Image (spheres, helix red, strand yellow):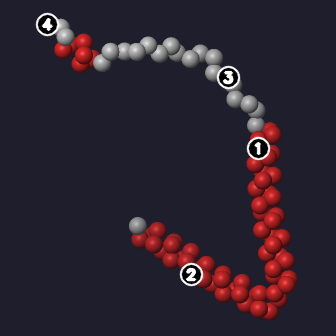
Amino acid sequence: MANDRAIGGAIFGGSIIGIIVYALLLWYWGPLIVEITAFVGVFVLLAILAWIGYTMATTPPPEPITDIPEMSPEKPASEGSAKKS
């Protein structure tokens, strides 16, 4: 539990530092940083979509289910033993 709190604190601190660094980069090199950020965002989104498409295109279809066991309604055990008198 304490390890989870330490990891959470590190993620929180790293995120705050990342926000500050990004803000400073925007302050000094605004248009370039916005262009790079937009490119990386679109690239990541399209890469994920390409990965999903490739996986769907190359995965063989599942085998059809042919032997489905027949289900018959069974009587509960308590019902059969209670009526034996």
How far apart are the two marked residues, 3 and 4, measured between alpha carbons? Answer: 48 Å
Give the vertical position of 85 relative to 63 (above or below). above
Residue 40, percent across and down? 80, 69
Which is more foreground, mark 4 or mark 1? 4
Which is more foreground, mark 3 or mark 4? 4
Q: Mark 1: which amino acid?
A: Thr
Residue identifier under label 4: 85
How far apart are the two marked residues, 3 and 1, measured between alpha carbons? Answer: 20 Å
Task: First in sequence, mark 2 or 3: give its number.
Answer: 2
Describe residue 44's horizontal placement relative to residue 79 as left or right: right
Per the image, label 3 sits on a secondary structure element best described as loop
How far apart are the two marked residues, 4 and 1, measured between alpha carbons? Answer: 63 Å
Task: First in sequence, mark 4 or 2: give its number.
Answer: 2
- Which image quadrant is residue 44 in? bottom right
**Residues packed near mark 3 inside 10 Å, few (<14), some (14 to 19) or many (20 plus):** few
Residue identifier under label 3: 64
Residue identifier under label 1: 55
**Which residue is rendered at x = 80% and y = 92% of the image?**
28
Task: First in sequence, mark 2 or 1: give its number.
Answer: 2
Give the vertical position of 20 relative to 66 (above or below). below
